Image: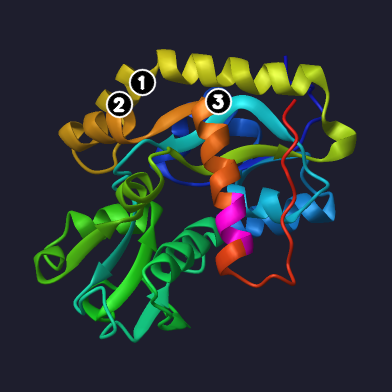
């Protein structure tokens, strides 16, 4: 059982709903980048954190068995692009909400020998999207299902990672302050996951986001909620890729699971 005093934060996205089943009234729902700040500051004890944040910060062990992952297309993390994925791709606007998605894109482009200029995305106005833009979470889903999508090509980063490595990709994990990393908290969060998965048919039928058919395909197919050996191998492969393709002055840490 999760201790009553534990302060918990999650993301306000459809894909996280099964991992906060029963915790809605005590959970702070914040963008991924804000969750990282709150966890580092000690204002949260556990946060559903972008995996890159956990890899860059040695003080936050990871709850075993629980993640937001995909084993192929993820549908909600992609580069919408009008320029080809070659040397003509000179500029990409980035949704700043998730450190992991930004770094996954950088790694995948670097593996292709591409290093475009990266600029911050000013907003989510679907009528004013740049030619090449990284989108994540519910804004990505709204874009993909909207009228603008046919004028773009969609490069699903989960599918691209799977094609490159043969491994699942883990987007988010429960990261915990060292002082709060107790067996009760870990078991409690794993129990919440089990409850959430048992309620998946309910979420598919009752959530207001998008269509029922899409919710079924997304929650019941694209998104995976386990953290097993294959997902851990994917995290390790991503950690190595970060050190190979990004700033070597910012070393990663080998995660500790509990």
Instruction: Tell me residue 156's x, y (percent).
Output: 29, 54
Instruction: Tell me residue 17's x, y (percent).
Output: 45, 33
Give the Cα separation between the discs numbered 2 and 3.
21 Å
Residues 24 and 191: in front is 191
Please name which of the two marks, 1 or 3, marks the residue nearer to the observer.
Answer: 3
Whichever of callouts 1 and 3 sits on the residue coming sooner in the sequence is 1
Residue 94 seen in render: yes
| Label 3 Cα crowd, 10 Å radius (few <14 / some 14-19 / many 20+) | few
Whichever of callouts 2 and 3 sits on the residue coming sooner in the sequence is 2
Rendered image quadrant of residue 22:
top right
In the image, residue 98 above or below residue 193:
below
Residue 227 seen in render: no
Q: Quadrant of the N terminus?
A: top right
Residue at point 36% right, 63% down? Answer: 135
Residues 254 and 119: in front is 254
Magenta residues: mostly which secondary structure? helix
Please name which of the two marks, 2 or 3, marks the residue nearer to the observer.
Answer: 3
Judge whether residue 222 is colored magenta: no
Contact between marks 2 and 1 (CB within 8 A): the answer is yes
Q: Which residues are magenta?
A: 239-243
Instruction: Tell me residue 71's x, y (percent).
Output: 36, 35
């Amino acid at each position: 059982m999760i201790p009553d005093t534990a302060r918990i934060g999650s993301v306000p996205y459809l894909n996280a709903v099964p991992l906060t089943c029963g915790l809605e009234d005590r959970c702070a729902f914040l963008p991924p980048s804000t969750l990282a700040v709150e966890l580092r500051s000690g204002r949260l004890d556990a946060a559903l954190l972008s995996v890159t944040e956990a890899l860059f910060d040695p003080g936050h062990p990871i709850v075993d068995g629980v993640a937001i992952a995909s084993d192929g297309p993820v549908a909600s993390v992609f580069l919408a692009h009008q320029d080809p994925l070659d040397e003509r791709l000179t500029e990409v606007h980035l949704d700043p909400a998730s450190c992991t998605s930004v770094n996954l894109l950088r790694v995948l482009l670097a593996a292709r020998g591409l290093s475009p200029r990266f600029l911050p995305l000013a907003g989510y106005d679907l009528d004013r999207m740049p030619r090449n833009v990284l989108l994540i979470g519910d804004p990505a889903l709204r874009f993909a299902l909207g009228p603008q999508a046919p004028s773009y090509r969609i490069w699903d980063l989960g599918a691209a990672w799977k094609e490159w490595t043969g491994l699942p990709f883990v987007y988010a994990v429960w990261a915990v302050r060292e002082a709060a990393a107790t067996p009760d908290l870990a078991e409690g969060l794993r129990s919440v996951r089990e409850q959430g998965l048992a309620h998946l048919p309910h979420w598919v039928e009752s959530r207001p986001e998008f269509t029922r058919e899409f919710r079924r395909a997304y929650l019941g197919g694209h998104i995976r909620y386990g953290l097993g050996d294959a997902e851990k191998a994917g995290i390790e492969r991503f950690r190595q890729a970060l050190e190979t393709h990004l700033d070597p002055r910012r070393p990663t840490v080998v995660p500790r699971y509990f």
